[in-house]
């Protein structure tokens, strides 16, 4: 609690000092050309919503011939409004500004979390053994078969996205993508633990897989709950009724949102994450280690 209070106060003082600069810069940017949006501010006092978020990044430009691969700090040069869906929000809320104080605060915050973690971290392995009194499907305990299906389905949806969308790099950097990846990984690890123990007889490896799979249970179900609730209850209505103008654009968004991929990662993700974590024959009580 003390660490969180320190973090909030630390950021609050930084925001108070920069809020006016942000608003002033937004006003000036609205009256300037697009080219000037790409220029880096000359001083901290002129820091606004655009520094370090454009094609020019902290990574130096490569002057070699031929040029080497360059990391792009900005992936979409759209002023923080994907497809223009968020133009109704102020620019300073969509793009923000860069502040070294935030970096320092994050270092202290996550450093503190690591330092004051529960010792030892306890994640009870839940390996179903062949002798357990549980209904089997093709020789696999039902709960383990569910994990196998979840794991394969999670991979299938990712492959489907790759084929139909061309790129799924965002799946590994967005909160929604992490949520889907973690629930898939959790199921894969716990199935792998059972398979390693029952088929390969590698109990040491099985226990490690079960430990890591068990450690992802609380994370998987809470992330899926957040994604499902925030998207369907808050973001979807706001985007659809406020951001989307009536007509073709709104209809296209509706079709996209209720398509196969979006339905999986925003709706089916919650019941999938709940299987064998909060519902099933292999559930366990969550502890302070899970909360950490």
Image: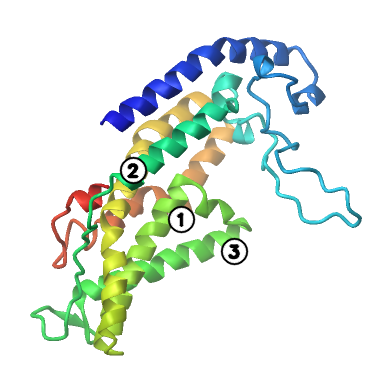
- Which residue, as the protein is rendered here, is positioned at the far right? 65
- Marks 3 and 2, the one that precedes in the sequence: 2
Numbered label tally: 3
Answer above or below: position of 61 versus 204: above
Determine the CA span between mark 3 and mark 1: 13 Å
Rendered location of residue 70, percent (x, y):
75, 51
Q: Which numbered tag is attached to residue 260?
A: 1
Pick the quarter of the image with the N terminus: top left
Report crowding for label 3: few under 14, some 14 to 19, many 20 or more residues within 10 A (C-alpha).
few
Report crowding for label 1: few under 14, some 14 to 19, many 20 or more residues within 10 A (C-alpha).
few
Q: Is residue 53 left or right of residue 6?
A: right
Q: Residue at x 29, y 76 (%)?
A: 193
Q: Is residue 244 left or right of residue 73?
A: left
Rendered location of residue 120, percent (x, y):
22, 57
Q: Nearer the viewer, mark 3 or mark 1?
A: 3
Q: Residue at x 71, y 11 (%)?
A: 28
- Marks 1 and 2, the one that precedes in the sequence: 2
The local secondary structure at tag 3 comes to: helix
Answer above or below: position of 250 versus 202: above
Q: Which residue is mark 3?
A: 163
Q: In this rendering, does residue 37 appear at all?
A: yes
Q: Nearer the viewer, mark 3 or mark 2?
A: 2
Q: Residue at x 40, y 42 (%)?
A: 111
Q: In this rendering, does residue 228 appear at all?
A: no
Q: Which residue is mark 2?
A: 113
């Amino acid at each position: 609690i003390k660490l969180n209070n320190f973090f909030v106060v630390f950021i609050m003082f930084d925001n108070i000092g920069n809020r006016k600069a942000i608003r002033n810069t937004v006003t000036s940017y609205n009256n300037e050309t697009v080219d000037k949006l790409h220029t880096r501010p000359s001083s901290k006092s002129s820091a606004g919503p655009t520094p370090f978020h454009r094609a020019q990044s902290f990574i130096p430009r490569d002057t070699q011939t031929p040029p080497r691969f360059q990391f792009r700090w900005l992936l979409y040069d759209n002023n923080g409004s994907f497809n223009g869906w968020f133009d109704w929000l102020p620019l300073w809320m969509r793009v923000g500004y860069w502040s070294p104080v935030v970096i320092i605060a994050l270092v202290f915050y996550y450093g503190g979390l690591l330092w004051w973690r529960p010792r030892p971290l306890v994640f009870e392995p839940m390996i179903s053994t062949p002798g357990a009194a549980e209904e089997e499907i093709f020789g696999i305990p039902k709960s383990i078969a569910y994990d196998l299906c979840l794991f394969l389905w999670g991979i299938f949806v990712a492959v489907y996205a790759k084929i139909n969308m061309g790129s799924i790099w965002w799946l590994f950097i967005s909160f929604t993508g992490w949520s889907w990846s973690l629930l898939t990984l959790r199921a894969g690890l716990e199935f792998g633990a059972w398979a390693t123990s029952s088929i390969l007889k590698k109990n040491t490896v099985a226990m490690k897989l079960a430990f890591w799979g068990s450690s992802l249970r609380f994370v998987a179900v809470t992330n899926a709950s957040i994604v499902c609730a925030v998207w369907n209850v808050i973001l979807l209505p706001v985007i659809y009724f406020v951001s989307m103008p009536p007509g073709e654009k709104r209809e296209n968004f509706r079709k996209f949102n209720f398509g196969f991929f979006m339905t999986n990662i925003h709706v089916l993700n919650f019941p999938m994450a709940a299987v064998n974590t909060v519902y099933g024959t292999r559930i366990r009580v969550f502890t302070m280690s899970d909360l950490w």
